[in-house]
Image: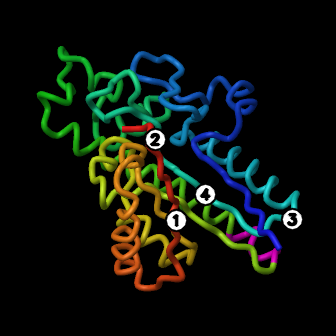
Amino acid sequence: GMLVYAWLEPPQVSQMFWQNHPQWREKNYKGEDVRPSWRYPVALTDKQCVDTMANFYKSLLEQYDWDGVNLAELYFEAGKGFDDPDLFTPMHPSAQKEVKKKYGIDLKSIFDPRSQFYWKTNVAVKPAIVEYRVSAIQDVLERLLGVCAEVAKKKNGFQVIVTALDSDGSPELREYIAVDMDRIIEMQKRFGFLLQVEDPESRWSTDPLRYTAIGKQYIGRVGDKNKILLDLNILNFRK
C-alpha cells in the first residue's frame, strides 16, 4: 500500500493565504513584502497570524484521511543572515514590537550604519537577534506540534514527522535562518515525532556518501535509529 502524508511548509500556508492577508506578509527592514525563496512567508511573530495558520492546518489534517503530517523546513526565510539585509526576516511589525520589548533594540535599525543598534558596531545586537529568531521558531514549532498531537489523538496510527535542516553539519544555519538542531532534538523528546534531517542546498552537489555520516551522527544524538529519517538531495547542478 501507500502512505499519504500532508507536507506543510511554514512560514508558508498557501499563496492564497498570503494574498488574502496582506497585513501578515513577512517584511524586510525597508517595510517591503519579502520572498527570499519560493515560499510565500507570513509573519511567524504575529500571534493572530500563527493562530489562524494553526487552525487552517488543523482543518486540513482533519478533513482528509491522512496517514500523517510532515512539518517541513520551518525557519525564517533569509539569505546569508546579517550579510543579506534585504532578505533578512523577521521584520514584521510584530517582530519589531517583540524585540523592542525584550531587548530594547529597534529591529528595523540594525542595518543602519548611523543607528546605535547597527549590528556591526553594537556587539550586543547580533547575539540578541539570533537568540530571538531561534526562540521564535521553537515557539511556533511547539504550537504546531500541539495541533498535530490533537489530530493524532483522533486518528489511529497518525504519524508526525519534522523535517529540519542540518545545523550540526552547517552551523551557519543558526544565524542565517534560525535553525537550531539542539532545541529541535530536545523537543523531539517531548513530542516523540520522527526527525527527518535535510542538508542545505549548498551541499546537494557534494559526495552522496555524506548521508552515511549524517545518519550515523544523528542516530548517535537521538539514540534510536527508528526515530531518524534522511531527506536525500543528490544533484549536480547546484553549488
Q: State the residue at coordinates (37%, 64%).
A: 209
Relative to 23, say whether 65 is above or below.
Answer: below
Which residue was labeled with disc 4? 71
Which residue was labeled with disc 1? 196
Instruction: Assess whether mark 2 and mark 1 are in contact (beta carbons under 8 angstroms).
Output: no
Marks 3/2: CA distance?
A: 30 Å
Magenta segment: 149-155
Instruction: Assess whether mark 1 and mark 3 are in contact (beta carbons under 8 angstroms).
Output: no
Q: State the residue at coordinates (39%, 52%).
A: 179
Task: Tell me the crowding category of disc 3: few under 14, some 14 to 19, or many 20 or more residues within 10 angstroms, Cα based.
Answer: few
Which residue was labeled with disc 2? 76
Which residue was labeled with disc 3? 65
Q: Secondary structure at mark 2?
A: loop
Residue type at mark 1: give it.
Gln
What x and y, as percent, mark residue 99?
36, 38
Residue type at mark 4: give it.
Leu
Residue type at mark 2: give it.
Phe
1 vs 2, front mark: 1
